[in-house]
Image (cartoon, helix red, strand yellow):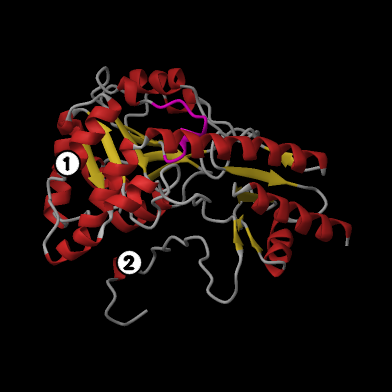
């Protein structure tokens, strides 16, 4: 770091994203991207004519996308705010609803950016341990008098709470915002979007990166009470009014409209996930009951770090977190059936070697 860096940033440890290596062709099962192409409707929407319009700024109100999203989720446009990926929606939410006097409560094993953003914005963290089986006890979040963020389904565990459990947390914290990060909800979770009109303190965040094949486009949605969304827009228009580019606005609208492709690809991933889980368990792995597009798995035969390195050496990338409680676990993205067969072949060679 330079001598000019603000002292308040010296203690911040930035988030480490999943590897995107350029040195060889890998089977990438490490960043929870979709193994399938974007919808043909998306490809058609991002046309040459739209590319030529890149000389113009995008619509800061995102009006077309908002109308489509509102119809899709049975909400009003003023109950939704698009973000540059769900990360931006989450960051804006923490900026709006937390500060040095208003902590953020979240699990000890969950999405790593929550803690990074708390450090960046000087927000006190209230870290609540998951149970020994990695499940979250909703009662741990009752009456906290703090802003709460819950990834549901959780990452990297893949475990999910039913909507009724989140509703209990909402009822127990009527004077605080409860943020539900639903990045993986389309693979078997139960969305809290239907609760939005009942709870003014509920903010739901979804992404187009996983189930709609648009990780590279950077698009997410924050959904909640219109007053909460107005708060987020206050942050957005104080920072980056043109946060969604023209092509992403078109791609996002088309992705929402093509429900048949969305349902087909989600079903394919769920089917491959079930098969892969069975195959890993047959090899002696412990595999959590995922409701996401990845599996969280561990074996007593090899440590997580060693297994990660050996898989990488065989051209298969998975995610390993060198962190307390999960150092012997791997997060494995669900790819195509062929991708998962290659993973299993590599594992067999490693475990039998």
**In the depicted view, which residue is nearer to us: 107 or 181?**
181
Q: Secondary structure at mark 1?
A: helix
Magenta segment main secondary structure: loop
| Residue 15 placement, left or right of 246 | right
Q: Quadrant of residue 221?
A: top left
Residue ID at (62%, 35%): 271
Residue under pointer 2: 9
Q: Position of residue 42 (x, y in %)?
A: 33, 49
**In the depicted view, which residue is nearer to us: 76 or 232?**
76
Q: Is residue 158 visible?
A: no
Magenta span? 183-191
Q: Using the numbered discs, state the Cα–Cα distance from disc 1 to disc 2 in whole angstroms.
A: 38 Å
Indicate yes or no whether the magenta region holds residue 190. yes
Q: Secondary structure at mark 2?
A: helix
Residue ID at (58%, 31%): 135
Residue under pointer 1: 64
| Residue 191 placement, left or right of 73 | right
Q: Is residue 148 above or below residue 317?
A: above
Q: Quadrant of residue 306?
A: bottom right
Q: Is residue 139 above or below residue 5?
A: above
Comparing labels 1 and 2, the label whose residue is closer to the camera? 1
């Amino acid at each position: 770091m330079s001598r000019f860096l603000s002292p308040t940033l010296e203690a911040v440890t930035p988030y480490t994203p999943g590897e995107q290596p350029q040195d060889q062709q890998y089977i990438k099962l490490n960043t929870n991207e979709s193994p399938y192409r974007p919808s043909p409707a998306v490809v058609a929407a991002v046309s040459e004519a739209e590319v030529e319009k890149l000389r113009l700024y995008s619509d800061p109100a995102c009006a077309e996308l908002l109308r489509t999203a509102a119809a899709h989720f049975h909400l009003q446009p003023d109950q939704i705010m698009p973000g540059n990926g769900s990360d931006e929606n989450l960051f804006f939410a923490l900026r709006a609803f937390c500060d040095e006097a208003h902590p953020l409560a979240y699990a000890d094993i969950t999405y790593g950016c929550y803690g990074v953003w708390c450090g960046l914005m000087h927000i006190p963290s209230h870290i609540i341990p998951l149970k020994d089986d990695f499940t979250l006890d909703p009662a741990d979040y009752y009456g906290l008098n703090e802003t709460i963020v819950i990834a549901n389904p959780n990452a990297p565990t893949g475990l999910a709470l039913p909507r009724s459990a989140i509703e209990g947390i909402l009822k127990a914290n009527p004077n605080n915002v409860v943020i539900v990060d639903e990045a993986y909800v389309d693979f078997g979770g139960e969305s809290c979007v239907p609760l939005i009109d009942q709870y003014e303190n509920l903010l739901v965040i979804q992404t187009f990166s996983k189930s709609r094949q648009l990780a590279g486009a950077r698009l997410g949605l924050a959904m909640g009470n219109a007053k909460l969304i107005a708060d987020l827009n206050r942050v957005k228009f104080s920072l980056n009014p043109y946060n969604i580019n023209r092509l992403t606005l078109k791609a996002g609208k088309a992705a929402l409209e093509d429900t048949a492709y969305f349902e087909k690809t989600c079903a394919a991933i769920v089917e491959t996930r079930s098969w892969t889980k069975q195959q890993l368990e047959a090899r002696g792995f412990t595999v959590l009951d995922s409701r996401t597009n990845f599996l969280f798995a561990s074996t007593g035969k090899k440590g997580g770090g060693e297994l990660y390195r050996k898989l990488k050496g065989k051209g298969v990338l998975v995610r390993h977190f060198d962190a307390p409680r999960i150092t012997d676990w791997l997060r494995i993205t669900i790819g195509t059936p062929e991708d998962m067969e290659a993973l299993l072949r590599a594992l067999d060679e490693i475990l039998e070697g």
